[in-house]
Amino acid sequence: MNAVLEPNVCNAYNGARFFYAIFQLSYNWGQTMTDTTAQPALPDRLSVNPRSPHHVAEIFEHDIGIKLNGKERFDVEEYCISEGWVKVPSHKALDRRGQPLLMTMKGEVEAFYK
């Protein structure tokens, strides 16, 4: 009779380990391994264009947002916080190299990580 009960005890032990593992997963649900890496500080001036001297590739590994006068903008190509301007592409106008012409908009600029 003991031989019949031993597998049940063993299965109960494995079941308890399983539920403990599920508890640990649910407790650490939102945390990932990339949370331990520090995000680089956002510079005063940043450009999306890789040919620009103000382009920093490490920053674009994270999601960033730009607010102009308190409203978030999603079409910003370049910004400068100290001078208070952002550059956004015009709708249809292109330069001679096929790049969109950039319009400068002035106001209070805020850059942040999402």
Image (cartoon, helix red, strand yellow):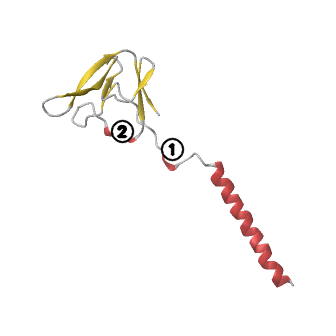
Side of 64 where 15 appears, left or right: right
Residue 26: give x, y in percent of width and height.
65, 51
SS assignment at label 2: helix
User: Looking at the rendering, which quadrant does residue 90 occupy?
Assistant: top left
The residue that label 1 is drawn on is: 35
Image point (41%, 39%), residue name? 62
Q: Residue furthest front?
A: 92
User: Looking at the rendering, which quadrant does residue 78 occupy?
Assistant: top left
- The kind of residue tagged 2 is Phe
* Among the two numbered marks 2 and 1 on one chain, the one whose residue lies closer to the N terminus: 1
Q: Can you tell which mark lies on residue 100? A: none
Residue 48: give x, y in percent of width and height.
29, 34
User: Looking at the rendering, which quadrant does residue 46 occupy?
Assistant: top left
Q: Nearer the viewer, mark 2 or mark 1?
A: 2
Q: Is residue 63 above or below residue 102?
A: below
Side of 8 where 76 appears, left or right: left
Image point (71%, 60%), residue name? 19
- The kind of residue tagged 1 is Asp
Q: How many marks?
A: 2
SS assignment at label 1: helix
Q: Is residue 22 above or below residue 43?
A: below
Q: Is residue 90 above or below residue 18?
A: above
Image point (85%, 83%), residue name? 2
The residue that label 2 is drawn on is: 60
Residue 68: give x, y in percent of width and height.
40, 20
Mark 2: give few (<14), some (14-19) or many (20+) Cα within 10 Å.
few
Distance CA(mark 2)–CA(mark 1): 16 Å
Image point (62%, 49%), residue name? 28
